Amino acid sequence: MRGVRAGRWRRVASQVGRSVTVWVVSTLTMLVLAGILPDFRLQSPTGDSATRIAVTAAFGAGAFGVLSAVVWPLLVRLFLLVPTLVLGLLVFFLNGALLLLALRLNPAERGDAAPETAVVVAAVMSAVASATGGALAVRDDDAYRRRLYRLADRRRRGGPAGPATPGTVFLQLDGVGHDVLLAAVRNGLMPTIARWLGHGDHSGRGVRPTHRLTPWRTDWSSQTGASQLGILHGSNHDVPAFRWYEKDRGEVMVCNRPTSAVELQQRAVAQAGHGGLLAVDGASRGNLFSGGAEEQALVLSIATRRRSRETRSRAGYFAYFSDPANAVRTAMSFLAEVGREIGQSTRTRIRKDRPRVGRGGLYPLVRAFATVVERDVVVAAVMGDMLAGRTAVYADLVAYDEVAHHSGPTSRDAAKVLQRLDRSLALIENVAEHAPRPYRIVVLSDHGQSPGETFRTRYGLTLGDLVRAGCGLPVSRKAERTHSGAEARAAVRAALRRPGKERREQYRPARGSEPIVLASGNLGLVSFPDVHHRMSKEEMDARHPALLTTLANHPGVGFLLVRSEEHGGVVLGPFGTEIPLDQLDENPGPLADFGPGVVEAVRRTHSFPHTADIMVNSWYDPAEGEVLAFEEQIGSHGGLGGAQARPFLLSPLALSEPPADIAGAEQVHKVLRGWLDEAGGPQVPLGRAEEKAA
């Protein structure tokens, strides 16, 4: 008992010592800033002795520290409804207000600062205090553990000690392909994953592997909406793309729109017959869908629901930003990332790099949110879940995907993001040592990314322009003047067997029948909203005789999928290629270069109720792995072709080995659910189809 008390007193003394040290450093920082900044003073207008100035600084630093610890969490809770980007900027002003209040509390009334100066002083002091506290705690495991437990306490609800059965953390590195991950390991960008795979450390010494790496194939729709819905809920049926038009509802569905996410999750739950992968003691962090978890933060599918204590989409922000040091550090990193993006995009323009897309407007802010704010908040939420002993946690880190879209999947910018993601993995691994139960960390991706310039850059017109030309509708003058625009018009005339002087107006369809053209990476979807069923090839040929020929023969198009009244479904390619779906095994035609599993993926998409009238997959170069995005992205995903369809699954050796040929997100769900069952914890219920099979 005496030894326990002595250890407790040592910990208290250590904590007091660190607090005093941080206070002293903050006081010195305040004195330095008072000497540098003209609008910040710590003495009366008539002057004071050095001792009185030091006392004023000490009192101000202490009051600022106390106010930050007491008032800041309340302020953050009040601002939970503020948009995220605005909250990042408010951090500085709120901190400045606290500093002004601390100076006003000085009984001698000797401290003063201009409001704009107070913002700068508060930011510097918070950053210095955070760095000092972190440096002092580096070698103190007890201090580190207490710091982590303070984070966990914000989510703890009380209860018994953690179970002996292991929990599982699923970390999704959004958009990181299998080959990109291996290249990053070989190039030393991701030492944590290299160690897990037994690739040795920087000294060249081998280490025993703890994880195995398994590639898997996506569905035709190789994007987060389809993949994550299938992984978390066991069904991504009727998700043909990232965005598509549903004729029966008269609505464009977009996977990252809150109302669409709610609808898709409800459909998946009904189709699968269970709540999801995380339905039993689970937590969902930073995802599009909840997975059935009770604990949710930054989950898109609950963003439209009324805010409550149990389910609020920004609950994760409070747990993180209630620490003012975290708030200031993340806000400063946010601004630094904005500057980094502006500098990198300027450099690419000066060097005239190709391929290149525009990166202006709000994109620097969007990138900074994805690579800094979202990462920091999600990682902190996962740490809290582990320390709270949750059984299953699934978190999505979107940083790489966002940067790779605009900089390229193998760019230097994207490589830097991979380095920072690896450090996040190392932090989570370290937290597992302090958790109340053992944890198995599974890392996976939802898709990869394929490089290549955009369809518009190469041909001077968009897919929408090409479709309008094939329908006899006017296109923009800029598109008409391009070489590809001339080719499109020539293809229309050839298909119609019309002379070049024929007027386009003769073939313009009636008002209201113009097609809706949507893009999901290098996958395009064409729908005719005035026809309430999925149009057949025969109907489209009768209505727009040149459309399918124009699309299929364009060099930027790989193949088309349409419904046929005669064959059920056909794949169209150049030079009049037309292959029924049931004959693709013998003759894959234009699908031959797209890799294994393509035929099954195309057939499955054809069976969806909301598949578009025309599904357009771009050209693909198997030698270079390049595709042509119908969106403004030089790293794209959403269709077939290249690395986008080859994500990875990195699993501990303690778990059973996954199948060698995992095809589709629904199969990934079965693998992950099997691992949860192996851990001996609560099991995810069987779906309806599985119950019938049993």
Image (tube, grey):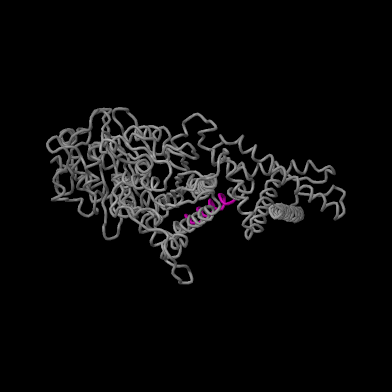
Residue 540: x and y in percent read 18, 35
345 is within the stretch colored magenta: yes
Residue sitting nearer the eye, 103 or 67: 67
Residue positioned 39% across, 57% down in the render? 653
Residue sitting nearer the eye, 76 or 120: 76
Q: Can the viewer see residue 22?
A: no
Residue 124: x and y in percent read 67, 52
The residue range painted magenta reads 332-346
Residue sitting nearer the eye, 118 or 692: 692
Q: Is residue 428 left or right of residue 20?
A: left
Q: Main secondary structure of the magenta part?
A: helix
Residue sitting nearer the eye, 682 or 210: 682
Q: Can the viewer see residue 269?
A: yes
Residue 401: x and y in percent read 42, 50
* As drawn, 316 above or below 635: above
Q: Is residue 203 left or right of residue 142?
A: left
Residue positioned 43% across, 48% down in the render? 170
376 is within the stretch colored magenta: no
Q: Is residue 56 left or right of residue 567?
A: right
Q: What is the tally of numbered marks visible in this picture?
A: 0
Name of the residue lying farthest toward the bottom: 204
Quarter of the image with the C terminus is: top left
Residue 207, by quadrant, is: bottom left
Residue 85, by quadrant, is: top right
Q: Is residue 691 left or right of residue 86?
A: left
Residue 443: x and y in percent read 42, 52
